[in-house]
Image (spheres, helix red, strand yellow):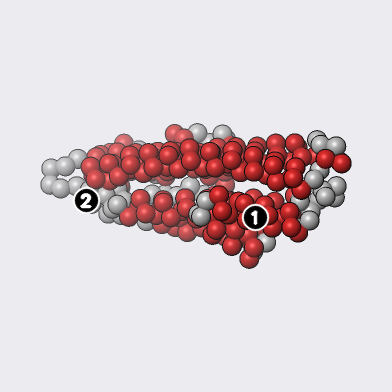
């Protein structure tokens, strides 16, 4: 049993060196602790966003991910459009001196340019949350299909070889999903860079998002490694 678990851990780690951080986290912390670290990472990201945008509360982030809140509604919350509109909203935005939305407009520049920049940034943040929700759901589907495949086997066939075969198949699917997600993130950050450069915004937002994404990804991998240990400890697994 322990050999099977250890073998699976090592196979996961050596497939990509970037998995080593997730493996170390999974070995050091319980699943609850990993979830807490992910929540703290999200809170820190929200805090950084609050320097410029009205951040989405965590309950609204979850609503956005599961479809109860639309992208347009999320953008309205983050830009403050739900609390103010028209010329008043533009004036309020222009007076804030945002970190990410650009400096105060130069003489003769329209305040609405800054408000438009904020709106475009907020739309990308909403897209980021939707990506996170969508890919997390797909990862869970891969995990569930692997578990179902294993326990669909006759008890006599639930061997170490079968465990590793199914686990590696799930890992391959997850890695393909990660590659796709990474490409989407690169595209999102490239678009954000162009917006910030166009409006003279603070490019540090790109680093904030990249750090948040990398940390959440490692913690999600650690969470599934923790589940892996539980999975292979279930009754009926030899």
Marks 2/1: CA–CA distance = 52 Å
Answer whether labels 2 and 1 touch (C-beta < 8 Å). no
Q: Is residue 192 left or right of residue 225?
A: left
**Residue 167: image location, x then y, percent:** 68, 44
| Placement of the N terminus among the 4 image quadrants | bottom right
Q: Is residue 21 left or right of residue 168?
A: left
Residue 104: which disc? 2
Residue 71 appears in the rendering: yes
Q: Nearer the viewer, mark 2 or mark 1?
A: 1
Please state which of residues 226 and 104 is positioned toward the viewer in this rendering.
226
Residue beneath the point at 75% across and 42% down: 162
Q: Is residue 96 left or right of residue 130?
A: left
Q: Where is 34 relative to 55, above or below?
A: below
Residue beneath the point at 50% across and 33% down: 70
Please state which of residues 237 and 44 is positioned toward the viewer in this rendering.
237
How dense is the environment of label 2, judged by Cα within 10 Å: few (below 14), some, or many (20 and up)?
some
Residue 69: which disc? none
How dense is the environment of label 1, judged by Cα within 10 Å: few (below 14), some, or many (20 and up)?
many
Residue beneath the point at 39% across and 42% down: 186
Q: Considering the numbered disc 1 on the image, is that residue within a helix, a strand or a loop? A: helix
Q: Where is 96 relative to 184, above or below?
A: below
**Residue 124: image location, x then y, percent:** 40, 40
Residue 140 appears in the rendering: no
Residue 9: which disc? 1
Please state which of residues 48 and 19 is positioned toward the viewer in this rendering.
19
Q: Is residue 14 left or right of residue 188?
A: right
Residue beneath the point at 63% across and 59% down: 26
């Amino acid at each position: 049993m322990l050999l099977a678990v250890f073998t699976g851990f090592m196979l996961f780690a050596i497939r990509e060196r970037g998995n080593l951080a997730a493996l170390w986290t999974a070995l050091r912390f319980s699943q609850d602790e990993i979830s807490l670290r992910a929540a703290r990472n999200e809170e820190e990201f929200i805090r950084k966003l609050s320097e410029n945008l009205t951040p989405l509360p965590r309950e609204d982030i979850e609503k956005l991910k599961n479809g109860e809140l639309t992208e347009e509604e999320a953008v309205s919350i983050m830009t403050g459009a739900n609390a103010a509109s028209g010329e008043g909203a533009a004036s309020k935005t222009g007076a804030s001196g945002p970190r990410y939305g650009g400096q105060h407009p130069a003489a003769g520049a329209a305040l609405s340019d800054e408000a438009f920049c904020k709106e475009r940034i907020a739309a990308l943040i909403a897209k980021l949350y939707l990506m996170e929700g969508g890919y997390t759901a797909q990862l869970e589907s891969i995990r569930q299909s692997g578990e179902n495949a294993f326990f669909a086997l006759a008890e006599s066939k639930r061997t170490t070889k079968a465990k590793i075969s199914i686990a590696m198949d799930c890992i391959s699917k997850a890695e393909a999903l990660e590659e796709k997600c990474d490409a989407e993130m690169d595209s999102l950050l490239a678009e954000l860079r162009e917006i910030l450069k166009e409006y003279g915004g603070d490019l540090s937002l790109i680093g904030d998002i990249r750090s948040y994404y990398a940390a959440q990804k490692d913690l999600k991998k650690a969470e599934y490694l923790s589940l892996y240990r539980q999975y292979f400890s279930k009754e009926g697994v030899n």
